[in-house]
Every structure is written in structure tokens, then in C-alpha cells.
Image (cartoon, helix red, strand yellow):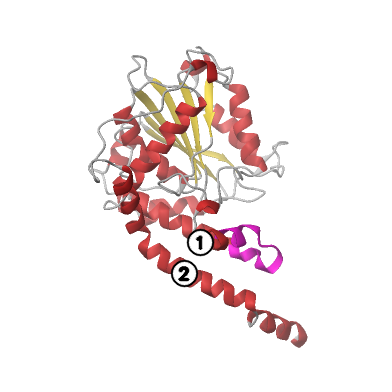
Amino acid sequence: MLKLINNILDWLRGGAFRLLILAGVILAIWGILSPIGTVVWWLTQSETLGWKRQSLQLPARSNSGSTGKPRNLTCYIVFLTGVGDFSTNELTEGEEDFLQGLAQTHQNCAVVKDVFPYSAANENLGGERLLAPVWRFANEAKGWLGVADVLIKIRNLWRFAISADERYGPVYNQGIAIAIAEQMNAAHPLSPDSQQPLDIILIGTSGGAQVALGATPYLNQWLNSEITVVSVGGVFGGINGFEQAKRVFHLRGTQDWVEDIGGIIFPSRWVFTIASPFSRARQQGRYQSFVSGPHEHDGAQGYFGKDYAPASKTTYVNLTLQAINQLPIWQRQDNK
């Protein structure tokens, strides 16, 4: 036992632990400055130097470049990942199965998964010049060093907090909305001047639910659309998006205690805050919450887990897929 303790202490005194401490310090400094980085990004991208954009400009695309989808496709499913993800091209096997299942069931909808909800510039962590080595180390570390992936979660939580912040959120959320619209257009050409409303279904898990809600007002402003937000174990505030979304659905697992955090830390979701957008949406029936199954927040028994759920004879991810397919949002799309 003493030998084991000594080995652990030797490891803690080693270079790997010092690297983690250094990375934590850098991350803390980066987190404090991240709102400034968001504003600077916006100033470099907007000709109006930070004033709210009134229109959306998309690159012209030819229908001949579409991927075999029907020309009259007007439904988009946009998936926004959780705070533990490194990039949009490194989705878990369960997340990929989930999106493939949606695409097969709702063939009149284009599935969009190339939006990283923790970067206003839609840039994966590997693309950040300064801290890319830190994020790669945290993402690829194995064994004892595997705990380093908490650095990615902390980093992404900063961006989640910015999205919910009333001061910096409008800037950040507009950037995400631009990325969503651009990736929708890349998946299937769209026209902001279309006479037929677009059905946009934003599916966000964990912190991605807050980012989806944050982007909703701007997508609603720029596009002729009806937006549905689906939170899968999401953590979100009670202000952004609830006035503009047609409906908001929240799926929660019985073993997921993380999704409860949103209702605790955001006063706009407290029961006695009856005038908040969240409370009004709930009173009007535009917000509804459902139990998805015995899900934990993440992992093999999470919403996109590949383990088999007890007494259900199917996987946890299939339970999530079934719960979403049963929501009253597909009738119009599936009848097209």
C-alpha cells in the first residue's frame, strides 16, 4: 500500500502533472479573456463593427451540387454537440448512429452536423493556433492522463456561459447562427427569401441546447422559418430563444443529475419567475419536458450510449432516437 502511495506521489511530481497544472493556469487565463476574443472576432467579421446584422448573406450554390436530396427539401435537422466534444468530425459512435437513424427515418430532412457550438467562428479545437497542442493532448491522453479531458469540458463551459450571458451572448450567438445557416446551405441550398417556411429542428445536447436557443432569434430573423429546439439532457437558461422558437422540447434521463443544473443556476427558470420567456413558453404549452429513459448524462449509459438499457432490450441511444421520433414535430416533414 505504501509503495502504491509513493508511486502515485512520484507521478504527481512528474512532468505530466506539471503540464496539467500549466495547462489549467493557461485555461483559466484564456477563459477570463474569452469574451474579449469573441468581441474581437465579431469586429473582424462584421462591416457594421459590432452592430446587429439585419440580413444574412450566403454563398450562391447550384442545386446540381446537392447530395441527391429532393429539390423541394425544406427541413433541416441541426445537431449541436455537448461540452465534452473536441470537434464536429469526432462524434462518438452513438452520436453517429443517432444522426444516421434520423436521416433514414426522415428522408425529407437534411442532417447538419458540421457546427461546433463552442466557437463563434465554427472552428474546432484543433484549429486554435495558441492552445491547439493543449486540446489535442487533453483529447488524446490515455490511462492516468485521461483525466485531462476535463480541460476540454472546462474550456467549452466558458463558451456555454458566454452564450447565456446577456452582455456577450448576442455577439457569440449571432456567430453560431451564421455558422448554422452556412452549414444548412452547404447541406442543401436555401434561400432567405423563400416563401415557404423552412422547418429547422435544432437538437442540442448538454451545453449545445443553450447554444441552440441562443442562435434561434437570429435564424428566425434572417430566414423565413419555423424553429423547433430539442434539448437532449440539455443545460440552458430561460431567456434566449423561447420567444422565437415555435416549440421547445426537453428530454431528460432519470439517472441524469446534470440536466437539473440549468433549473438551479438560472433564475429565469425558477418556478416563481413567472414573467420570464421560459415560464411564458411553459404556460402556453410551447415548452414541454419528457422522460427519455434511464439515461445518465453521458458515457455508455448516456443519451448516445451503446450499452443495452435494462428491461428495454435496446440500447440507450435507440431509446433517445425513439423518444425524439415520437415528438409531435415530424408530421409535416414526413408528409412532404
The amino acid beneath tag 1 is Leu
Q: Residue at x 59, y 65 (%)?
A: 148
Circle on res. 324: none
Is 214 on the left-hand or right-hand side of 12?
left
Count of number-bearing discs: 2
- Which residue does the image show at 36% across and 48% down from the upper left? 237
Residue 199 figure quarter = top left
Identify which residue, 200 or 31, lies in the foreground. Answer: 31
- Estimate how packed mark 2 is, as few (under 14), some (14 to 19) or many (20 or more) residues with alpha carbons within 10 Å: few
Name the secondary structure under disc 2.
helix
Q: Is residue 316 left or right of residue 134?
A: right
Position of residue 84 in the picture relative to residue 146 (left or right): left
Find numbered disc 1 in the image and state the secondary structure of the residue it sits on: loop
Q: Which image quarter: residue 245? A: top left
- Does the rendering let one see residue 68? yes
Q: Which residue is mark 2?
A: 26
The residue segment tinted magenta is 135-148
- The reply to whether discs 1 and 2 touch (Cβ–Cβ < 8 Å) is yes
C-alpha separation, residue under disc 1 versus residue under disc 2: 9 Å
- From the top left corner, tell me how far across and down residue 293 is, in percent: 59, 41
Q: Is residue 328 visible?
A: no
Question: Is residue 145 positioned above or below 324 on the image?
Answer: below
Q: Is residue 191 left or right of residue 124?
A: left
